[in-house]
Structures are given as structure tokens and as C-alpha cells.
């Protein structure tokens, strides 16, 4: 199978219907970058920046971060990397920050909430990214955006840092894309202005699913209780895709489900244009996309919904079993 996937490396993830899906990889370490070439991914759809903060016993310095981000960009050789700003709190606690005793950290003071309330670290991280880019295009993505105002504020910090870097005489990227992760259901119902302003949306399916079903992703008893192919959840994802389409906002998905071939098909069929996953999943997902017509997959999902099924999985598995080998 490995050989078969290797032979697909240079080929697009294109369905029989002609739709091309951009397959990207998730990363968080310098050591992940060689997989970019090996897997044939189009870029890094999610670069989790927490690790550099977690592996130290003190806050990293701006220059250290800038040097690291520059090496990551060098290794990507011009492929796009979506750098996600720090997502701490919840399950990721920094050793040098006073732990907050929160009854419910996943819904607590985490991610962009920390970034906006104590913007020093967020601004330092943005400065490090701008310096690392050194004129190259840059993509920044904010975690856990819940309403329009949080996005405008976070974006404001980036715009101010760009202005400041320029006034200090540093080169700034000619293009900075600023996106938001959709990880709470509220963002799907944000005002149209949000979808107009944001450069792209990336669904953080791990968190979005836990909040949609109210099922803790860390709790073994409930974390697999609800199927990602549950038709209520798929309808919800389809609404997000429709809102993005209405404003021509690129939409991707970077939770673990993007790397599961059947889930990946469903996401692509509902209008998700980019899927970001573990590098090892790129081959299997691509191989399956290339065998199917995504319009037919969508019709299978909609027929399952109309029939009153709970999940699209049985219908999709039946459909796939009937495909020519
Ligand atoms: C997600 O929530 O789906 C996601 C990609 O972010 P993380 O898993 O780091 O919370
Ligand atoms: Mg998340």
C-alpha cells in the first residue's frame, strides 16, 4: 500500500467529478517538516505553536521563536503554513504560568481568550512570525474564535504589529492572511461581516464536535459516543460551508477526522475545500478521493438524511463497497 500511495504523490486529490481537494498536513515541530515533501501535502494547514512553549521552563524569547519559525518556513520551501497562535489553557498548561483552577478548562480561559486579555504574548508571537517571514507571505490563524468581536480584536493586534514593524524599518510580508478556527458552534452563526472580513476559516473539528455534542474529547466514556458522520453534525458542517461559500471564504478542516478517509470524503462532498491531517493520512485520503464522484457522495449523504437515518456511515459504506476496485 505504501508504494501505491507513493505513486500518487505528485497527483492531485481530484474526485471523478473533477473537484480538487487540497490535502495538507498538521505539524508542531521542526522534525515534522520533512514529511511535507514525503507525504505530498500541499502545505501545513495547522502548525500548532504550543510545543515550543510547553517544552521549556520559561517563556521563549522573541528572537528564539523568530529563528525557529524562519527554519520552519525555510523547510517548507514556499508551501503555505498556517501558524496557529498559542492555544494554551484547557488541556495544554504552561509550566511557568500560574495554573488556573478552573472547573471546566475546555470552556475556560484558553486560547484567544488568554491572547486578548493578556496580549503581550500574542503580540510577541506575531512579531516573531513577521520577522521570521522576512518579506515572505505569512498565514496566521487564531484558535477558538467564538464571535466577530474576538476576531476583529485579534486581527487588530496583527495589523498594529505590521505597522510597528514597518515603522521600525523592518521588511513586512507583502501578503499576510489572517484566518480563524471555527471551534465553537456560535461562530457558525456569526454576522455576515465575520465571513467577509476573515481571509479563511478552518474548522477545528476536535473541539467543534465536543461542543456540538456536549461530549468531552478527553473523556473515554463519551468521546467516541457520537459519530462524526451523524447527520445532525453533517448538516451543521454543511451550513458552515454554505456561509463560507456565500462570501467566497476558503474553508478547511484541521481536526483528526480530516485524516479518516470516509470522514474526509463526507467533508469534501459538503464543500470543505482543504483537509489538514497527519502526514501518514494524506496517501489513503487521496487514494479514496480519486476513486469517487463527490457529487454522488453528497447525494448519498442527503438521501440518508431524508430517510431519517442517524448517521451517514452505513449508507456511505454501502456505496463504497459497490465501487469498482
Ligand atoms: C481541533 O480542535 O480540531 C484542533 C485542530 O485543535 P486542537 O486539537 O489543537 O485543539
Ligand atoms: Mg482545538
Image: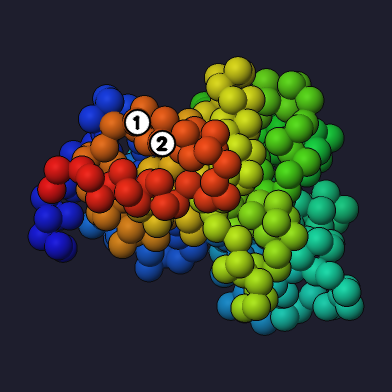
Who is closer to the viewer here, 20 or 153?
20
Residue at horizontal 23%, vertical 45%? Answer: 322
Locate residue 269, reporting x and y percent: 42, 34
Distance between the Cα atoms at labels 1 and 2?
A: 6 Å
Locate residue 292, reporting x and y percent: 26, 37
Q: Secondary structure at mark 2?
A: helix
Residue 56, above or below 273 = below
Whether label 1 touches label 2, CB < 8 Å: yes
Mark linked to residue 238: none
Q: Is residue 234 left or right of residue 324?
A: right
Residue 182, above or below 39 = above
Who is closer to the viewer here, 169 or 84?
84
- Location of mark 1 (residue): 296
Q: Is mark 2 within 8 Å of ligand 1?
A: no
Residue 78: quadrant of the picture = top left
Locate residue 321, reporting x and y percent: 25, 50
Who is closer to the viewer here, 321 or 194?
321
Q: Which image quarter is the N terminus in?
A: bottom left
Taking the view exactly as shown, the residue that stands out farthest to the front is 307
Q: Is residue 42 left or right of residue 218?
A: left
Q: Is residue 68 left or right of residue 101?
A: left
Give the tally of numbered discs.
Answer: 2
Would residue 223 be visible to someone looking at this image? yes
Residue at horizontal 79%, vertical 75%? Answer: 97
Residue at horizontal 79%, vertical 25%? Answer: 191
Locate residue 124, reporting x and y percent: 70, 53
- Location of mark 2 (residue): 300
Amino acid at each position: 500500500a505504501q508504494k501505491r500511495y507513493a505513486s500518487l504523490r505528485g497527483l492531485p486529490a481530484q474526485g471523478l467529478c473533477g473537484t480538487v481537494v487540497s490535502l495538507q498536513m498538521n505539524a508542531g515541530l521542526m522534525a515534522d517538516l520533512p514529511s511535507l515533501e514525503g507525504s505530498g501535502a500541499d502545505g501545513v494547514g495547522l502548525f500548532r505553536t504550543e510545543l515550543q512553549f510547553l517544552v521549556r521552563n520559561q517563556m521563549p524569547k522573541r528572537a528564539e521563536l523568530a529563528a525557529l519559525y524562519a527554519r520552519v518556513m525555510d523547510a517548507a520551501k514556499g508551501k503555505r503554513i498556517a501558524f496557529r497562535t498559542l492555544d494554551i489553557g484547557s488541556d495544554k498548561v504552561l509550566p511557568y504560568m500560574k495554573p488556573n483552577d478552573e472547573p471546566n478548562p475546555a470552556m475556560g480561559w484558553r486560547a484567544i481568550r488568554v491572547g486578548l486579555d493578556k496580549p503581550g504574548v500574542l503580540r510577541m508571537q506575531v512579531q516573531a512570525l513577521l520577522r521570521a517571514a522576512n518579506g515572505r507571505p505569512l498565514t496566521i490563524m487564531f484558535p477558538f474564535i467564538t464571535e466577530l468581536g474576538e476576531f476583529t480584536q485579534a486581527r487588530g493586534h496583527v495589523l498594529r504589529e505590521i505597522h510597528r514593524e514597518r515603522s521600525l524599518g523592518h521588511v513586512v510580508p507583502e501578503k499576510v492572511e489572517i484566518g480563524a478556527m471555527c471551534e465553537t458552534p456560535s461562530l457558525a452563526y456569526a454576522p455576515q461581516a465575520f465571513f467577509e472580513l476573515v481571509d479563511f476559516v478552518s474548522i477545528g473539528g476536535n473541539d467543534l464536535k465536543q461542543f456540538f455534542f456536549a461530549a468531552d474529547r478527553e473523556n473515554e466514556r463519551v468521546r467516541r459516543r457520537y459519530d462524526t458522520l451523524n447527520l445532525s453534525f453533517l448538516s451543521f458542517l454543511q451550513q458552515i460551508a454554505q456561509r463560507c461559500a456565500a462570501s467566497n471564504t476558503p474553508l478547511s478542516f484541521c481536526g483528526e477526522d480530516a485524516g479518516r478517509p470516509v470522514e474526509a470524503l463526507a467533508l469534501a462532498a459538503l464543500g470543505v475545500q482543504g483537509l489538514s491531517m497527519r502526514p501518514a493520512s494524506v496517501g489513503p485520503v487521496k487514494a479514496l478521493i480519486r476513486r469517487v464522484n463527490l457529487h454522488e457522495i453528497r447525494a448519498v449523504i442527503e438521501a440518508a438524511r431524508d430517510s431519517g437515518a442517524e448517521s451517514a456511515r452505513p449508507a456511505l459504506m454501502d456505496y463504497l463497497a459497490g465501487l469498482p476496485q
